[in-house]
């Protein structure tokens, strides 16, 4: 499907005439060694249906046992989101029939989540801070994975048959649900993206998950509704399911605002439904009519006792929380002396950890920023990859800068050495040696090159001899060319003046 088959209103026009309201449900897979309710391993990429037990297969008589590490991770996430941690909470059965849930119900939490009533301050690219209210964060298990074979879209409609892999069934999940995010207007897509990105950074800081969106460790369900004005009741919402990249979260919100505006303009009614996001075409398509809570027939899980984290334990966990990403960024900015705009560029490029490690390896903050936000950022952009995916480490960048500062490389040679490192030719030291790229600092070869350049340009030499130093650059340029850029330009200038004075 293409956008040409969907009625859309221009985005700017849509947000000028309607007030968008968004809500986001984020699921994060926890990085525990075993599943939420059984001892099956959770390693990524195993052969299908090899990481299962009777519990995760839903076999009769198999009883669940709660994963204590998952509970601790849930409390960490709740505290990081400024939530209240429940003194007592319990699990519930969320009943529905689908092949990826072999029990025919998902063990989740309904009216008694482990964390509730929190907030997260989200910083946008221009420094604007938006407070997102958190309704709840609750524990649950993931479903299995269905693969639909034979169709054109990879979805169940039109497929010849389907396969199910239960390796993922029972993986521990935390679902974080916002309250309606209002008052953001035209910036709704940007707020949605920044919120999910901030959550991802928190998960990594807490070390509760690898939080790799491309692996499905973090998935967002994006709710969007429109209303005529900020004081009107909330409109009917749609929920775009399982969006798994920051860019797609932003695009999905933007598309739904334009689509719903067109529906309302045409006198239609927005249907409360789930929708699928299509990364290739940038559109959403209908899924199923959205179920309400009563449709799932929630009832308390009889095979699990209530969870009652002691206040002492909660405070012990609170004391172990690391520095949160926003506070860390502010501290690093102060330490590095970056301007606000410079720091925002670093954050937006995903370069904080890379620069921090480069500084720890011995480079100055200014030099680390120069390499990562300059030559390396251009390379990553050209190759269409993230900075962290480049084949160069912070230690190697610091080593490269050390060669520059020691005078063994100039900037031009250093860029050539960096290209060799990125090509997998070894460390900066090794590439410089193997390619013969170090600065020529021996006066012997430099004097010979200077004399040759002066002899080739006698008129220039005469002007310098008469006190006109402007043409010195021409001689330096000739020497640099003769030495393939490996001469120390400062030393060459000194030698030119010395040799001319001796004539």
Image (cartoon, rainbow, N blue to C red):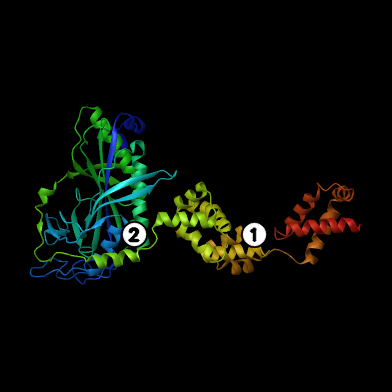
Query: Could one spot residue 161 in this view of the protein?
Result: yes
Residue that mark 2 sits on: 203
**Residue 171 in the image: x percent, y percent?**
23, 64
In the displayed image of the protein, which residue is found farthest to the front? 312
In the picture provided, is 334 more to the left or to the right than 289? Answer: right
Q: Could you give the CA–CA distance between mark 1 and mark 2, rounded to whole angstroms?
A: 40 Å
**Dot 1 corresponds to which residue?**
413
Residue neighbourhood size for the residue with mark 1, other residues' Cα within 10 Å, grouped as few (<14), some (14–19), many (≥20): many
For this view, does 394 lie left or right of residue 131? Answer: right
Q: If the image is split into quadrants, where does the N terminus sit?
A: top left
- Decide: is 231 above or below 314: above
Q: Look at the image and tell me whether residue 145 can be seen.
A: no
Q: Residues within 10 Å of mark 2 (few under 14, many from 20)?
A: many
Residue 476: horizontal and vertical position, in percent?
77, 54
The picture quadrant where one finds residue 14 is top left
Judged from this view, the residue extending furthest toward the right is 503
- Whether 198 is drawn above or below 230: the answer is below
Residue occupying the point 45% across, 52% down: 347
The answer to which of 266 and 124 lies nearer the viewer is 124
Mark sitting on residue 471: none
Sequence-wise first label, 1 or 2: 2
Q: Does dot 1 land on a helix, a strand or a loop? A: helix
Q: Secondary structure at mark 2?
A: helix
Residue at 52% x, 65% y: name it. Answer: 360
User: How far across and down, in percent of the image, does residue 107 sit?
Assistant: 15, 60
Q: From the viewer's perspective, is 114 left or right of 373?
A: left
In the foreground, 338 or 256: 338
Q: Position of residue 294 (x, y in %)?
A: 10, 48
Image quadrant where residue 400 sits:
bottom right
In the displayed structure, 206 sits above or below 133; it is below
Q: Quadrant of the C terminus?
A: bottom right
């Amino acid at each position: 499907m293409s956008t040409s088959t969907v009625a859309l209103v221009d985005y700017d026009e849509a947000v000028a005439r309607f007030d968008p309201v968004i809500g986001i449900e984020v699921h994060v897979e926890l990085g525990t060694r075993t599943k939420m309710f059984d001892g099956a391993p959770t390693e990524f990429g195993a052969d299908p249906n090899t990481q299962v037990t009777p519990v995760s297969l839903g076999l009769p008589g198999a009883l669940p046992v709660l994963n204590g590490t998952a509970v601790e991770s849930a409390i960490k996430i709740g505290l990081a989101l400024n939530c209240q941690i429940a003194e007592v909470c319990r699990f519930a059965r969320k009943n529905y029939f689908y092949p990826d849930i072999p029990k025919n119900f998902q063990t989740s939490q309904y009216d008694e989540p482990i964390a509730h009533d929190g907030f997260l301050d989200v910083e946008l690219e221009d420094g604007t801070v938006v407070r997102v209210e958190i309704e709840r964060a609750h524990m649950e298990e993931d479903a299995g994975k269905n693969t639909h074979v034979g169709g054109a879209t990879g979805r169940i409609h039109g497929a010849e048959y389907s396969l199910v892999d239960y390796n993922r069934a029972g993986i521990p999940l935390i679902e974080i649900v916002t309250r309606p995010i209002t008052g953001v207007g035209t910036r709704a897509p940007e707020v949605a993206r920044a919120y999910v990105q901030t959550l991802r950074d928190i998960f990594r800081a807490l070390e509760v998950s690898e939080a790799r969106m491309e692996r499905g460790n973090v998935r967002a369900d994006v709710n969007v509704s429109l209303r005529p004005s900020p004081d009107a009741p909330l409109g009917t919402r749609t929920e775009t399911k399982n969006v798994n990249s920051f860019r797609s979260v932003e695009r999905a919100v933007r598309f739904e605002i334009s689509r719903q505006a067109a529906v309302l303009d045409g006198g239609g009614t927005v249907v409360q439904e789930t929708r699928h996001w299509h990364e290739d075409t940038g559109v959403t398509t209908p899924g199923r009519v959205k179920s309400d809570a009563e449709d799932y027939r929630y009832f308390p899980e009889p095979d699990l006792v209530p969870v009652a984290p002691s206040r002492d334990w909660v405070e012990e966990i609170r004391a172990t929380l690391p520095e949160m990403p926003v506070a860390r960024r502010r501290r690093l900015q102060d330490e590095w002396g970056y301007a606000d705009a410079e720091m925002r560029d670093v954050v937006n490029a995903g370069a904080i950890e890379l620069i921090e490690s480069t500084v720890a390896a011995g480079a100055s903050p200014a030099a680390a920023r120069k390499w990562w936000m300059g030559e390396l950022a251009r390379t990553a952009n050209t190759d269409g990859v993230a900075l962290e995916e480049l084949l160069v480490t912070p230690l190697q960048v610091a080593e490269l800068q050390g060669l520059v500062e020691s005078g063994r490389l100039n900037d031009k040679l250093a860029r050539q050495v960096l290209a060799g490192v990125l090509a997998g030719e070894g460390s900066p030291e090794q590439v410089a040696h193997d390619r013969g790229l170090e600065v020529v600092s021996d006066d012997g070869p430099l004097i010979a090159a200077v004399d040759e350049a002066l002899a080739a340009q006698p008129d220039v030499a005469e002007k310098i001899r008469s006190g006109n130093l402007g043409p010195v650059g021409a001689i330096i340029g000739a020497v640099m060319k003769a030495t393939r850029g490996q001469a120390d330009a400062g030393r060459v200038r000194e030698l030119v003046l010395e040799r001319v004075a001796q004539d």
